[in-house]
Amino acid sequence: MTQLSKRPVTWLRRNLVVIAGLLTLAYMILPNVVVMVFSFNKPNGRFNYAWQQFSLDAWKDPCGVADLCGSLALSLQLGFWAMLGATVLGTMVAFALVRYRFRARGAINSLIFLPMAMPEVVMAASLLTLFLNMGAPLGFWTVLIAHIMFCLSFVVTAVKARVMSMDPRLEEAARDLYAGPLQTFLRVTLPIAAPGIAAGALLAFSLSFDDFIITNFNAGSTVTFPMFVWGSAQRGTPVQINVIGTAMFVIAVLVVLGGQLLASRRKNSAAPE
């Protein structure tokens, strides 16, 4: 093999990881691109599966389909409260598991991963059995409790990883400077753990907003956005669903980019001149 023919092989070896990463990213983004494109479609019938013509009608009236925005508002509300509940409980559990030694600590560490490893349909059926035996009416509150229980493990895992990487000497230095326990927590511990808490909160919101299986078992007559999409797919998929999906995707991307930009600015401002 000549030197000239070796160059493509050498270049491919050097950039193989980058190429694989870009192909994986393209594979993951492709469905979102299809959703985005078909949000500008104007189908002739009820099914938005074939491109017909470009139109902005769905963007001008995203709530044109009955109950769509109502189900979306309900999912956003559930996602917010599930995120809040799971983040508060998960953060406390993560700090307890990392900072303290107590009986059954190892068992709790193992049990935390059960909701993540267990099939959702099993957890959904178990929660439904629990609510029925308690005589609780199925609806908003049963879905919220189920979402918090489901998201809790993910928040604990995210926060726990951050807390384990924290340097305890920073808190000791704050106490040496006569900072009280609350002052140390608010000014030292919480800011350092904040990225892990924020990651867990965003993950909890995404899981709650996107969940269908657990919600379908425990919702009763309550209809969330994923359930609305599933029900609409039986009769035809409105273009407005693609509009909402595109908007959510763009907002998620902007949040991630904003977080990266903020972290970069903080890093540059903290760097010595």
Image (spheres, rainbow, N blue to C red):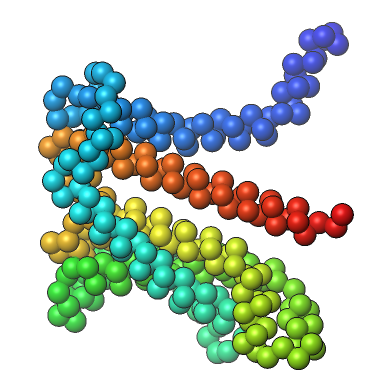
Q: Which quadrant would residue 119 be assigned to in this image?
A: bottom left
Seen at 46% across and 58% down, the residue is: 203
Q: Where is residue 44 in the image (x, y as percent from the top left)?
A: 15, 22
What residue appears at the point 37 percent right and 42 percent down from the top-left corner?
A: 247
Closest to the observer: 204 or 153? Answer: 204
Residue 124 image point, x, y percent:
27, 64
Kindly indicate the quadrant of the structure image that contains residue 71.
bottom left
**Residue 4 placed where, x, y %?**
82, 9
Query: In the picture provided, is 76 more to the left or to the right than 7?
Result: left
Along the line of sight, the residue nearer the viewer: 86 or 14: 86
Please tell me in which quadrant of the rendered image residue 82 appears: bottom left
Tell me if residue 78 comes above or below residue 112 in the rendering.
Answer: above
Quadrant location of the N terminus in the rendered image: top right
Q: Where is residue 192 shown, x and y percent of the image? A: 66, 70
- Counting every numbered tag in the picture gives 0
Q: Which of 218 and 54 is in front in this view?
A: 54
Which residue shows up at 64% across the image and 71% down it?
191
Where 216 sits versus 234, above or below? below
Residue 172 visible in the displayed image: no
Above or below, 45 against 59 in this view is above
Left/right placement of residue 137 relative to residue 188 reads: left
Which residue lies at the image location 22% right of the left edge and 24% below the top edge? 42
Indicate the quadrant containing the C terminus: top left, top right, bottom left or bottom right.
bottom right
Residue 156 appears in the figure:
yes
Q: In this view, does 237 lie above or below 147?
A: above
